[in-house]
Image (cartoon, helix red, strand yellow):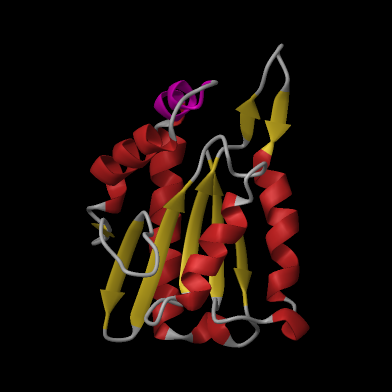
Amino acid sequence: MKLLVQKGYGQSCGYKSFLNDARNIERFIETKKNKMGALNIKGASSQKVQQFLYGGIIKKLGYKSEKKQDYFVPDFIKLSNKLGIIIEVERGKTVNNNMDFIDFWKCHIHPKCNMLIIIVPNTVPRSQNKTVKVYPFVVRRMAPLFEKKNYTNVKALAIIPY
């Protein structure tokens, strides 16, 4: 897991809850490596990964599946008094369709959320035994957004591979 946090934000009480959730999701994925691998096949949908994670850990952590919003639809969301976290689960379109940036944007414009967990595959199978290394690519792309000169409304980001 890669954590990207704006300077000074890591001591907030909201961040501690965010970090706890990210670590719980990471541990769950680690214990279910074989099942997660079986879901990451060519042509598979991210919805199957979402359903598996939601039933296994995300719902237990208090997140709700978002179905209707006027401005966008995050995969999962947790809101409380001082806490707003979005979880996005990706699979095949992460890199080619810039889904990681779209996920980041959803969090940036959300009126109550400022922390994001993106769950991405380590690699995605492509044609003829080729793979794309998704996780390191997403980490490299997101890191500049946490340099002070590039700060946004997203205060913390956890990128979790599967």
Count of marks placed on residues: 0
Q: On the image, which quarter does residue 32 sit in?
A: top left
Q: On the image, which quarter does residue 135 sit in?
A: top right
Residue 162 sits above or below residue 142 on the image: above
Q: On the image, which quarter does residue 42 sit in?
A: top right
Q: In this rendering, does residue 1 appear at all? A: no
At 43% across and 40% down in the image, what residue appears?
29
Give the residues in magenta: 34-41
Q: Is residue 38 magenta?
A: yes
Q: Main secondary structure of the magenta part?
A: helix
Residue 24 sits above or below residue 51 on the image: below
Residue 128 sits above or below residue 84 on the image: above
148 on left or right of 117: right
Q: In this rendering, does residue 79 appear at all? A: yes
The residue furthest top is 128
Q: Is residue 152 magenta?
A: no
At 36% across and 75% down in the image, what residue appears?
84
**What percent of the width, then of the height, locates residue 3?**
60, 63
**What percent of the width, then of the height, locates residue 121?**
56, 38
1 on left or right of 89: right
At 29% across and 47% down in the image, what residue appears?
57
153 on left or right of 88: right
**What percent of the width, then of the height, locates residue 68?**
26, 61
**What percent of the width, then of the height, locates residue 159?**
57, 55
At 30% across and 66% down in the image, what residue appears?
69
